[in-house]
Image (cartoon, helix red, strand yellow):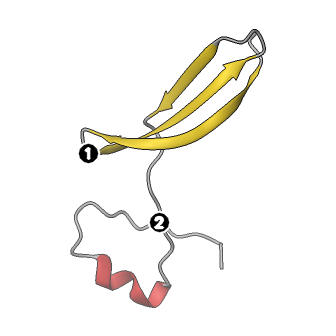
């Protein structure tokens, strides 16, 4: 198993999807890049405003216990 640390977290949009990029360096000194395209942008909307998003096809509303 490798050990190291992240130097620069960022993201890019590739084919209209966000890709999280983690640039770092292993303990051996070798540079690395991890890319993850599973992350989705999110934001919180008050329950009373949920209906205003119904017409947006690319937005999925999920209930949460957060306040």
- Which residue does the image show at 24% across and 38% down from the upper left? 15
Give the left or right position of residue 6, taking residue 40 as reference. right
Residue under circle 1? 16
Q: Position of residue 47 (x, y in %)?
A: 48, 84
Q: Nearer the viewer, residue 55 or 21?
A: 21
Give the left or right position of residue 20, taking residue 31 as reference. left
Q: CA distance from mark 1 to mark 2?
A: 22 Å
- Which residue does the image show at 30% across and 84% down from the upper left? 52
Residue 62 got which mark?
2
Q: Secondary structure at mark 1?
A: loop
Mark 1 or 2: in front is 1
Q: Nearer the viewer, residue 55 or 10?
A: 10
In the displayed structure, 55 sits above or below 42; it is: below
In the displayed structure, 54 sits above or below 39; it is: below
Q: Secondary structure at mark 2?
A: loop
Specify few, some or many for label 2: CA neighbours under 10 Å numbering under 14, 14-19, or 20 or more. few
Q: Position of residue 63 (x, y in %)?
A: 52, 70
- Which residue does the image show at 58% across and 40% down from the upper left? 9
Q: Position of residue 24 (x, y in %)?
A: 64, 26
In the displayed structure, 38 sits above or below 41; it is: above
Q: Position of residue 46 (x, y in %)?
A: 50, 84
């Amino acid at each position: 198993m490798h050990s190291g640390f992240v130097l620069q977290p960022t993201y890019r949009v590739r084919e209209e999807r966000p890709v999280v990029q983690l640039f770092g360096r292993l303990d051996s000194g070798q540079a690395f890049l991890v890319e993850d395209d599973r992350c989705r942008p999110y934001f919180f909307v008050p329950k009373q405003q949920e209906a205003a998003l119904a017409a947006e096809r690319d937005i999925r509303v999920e209930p949460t216990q957060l306040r």
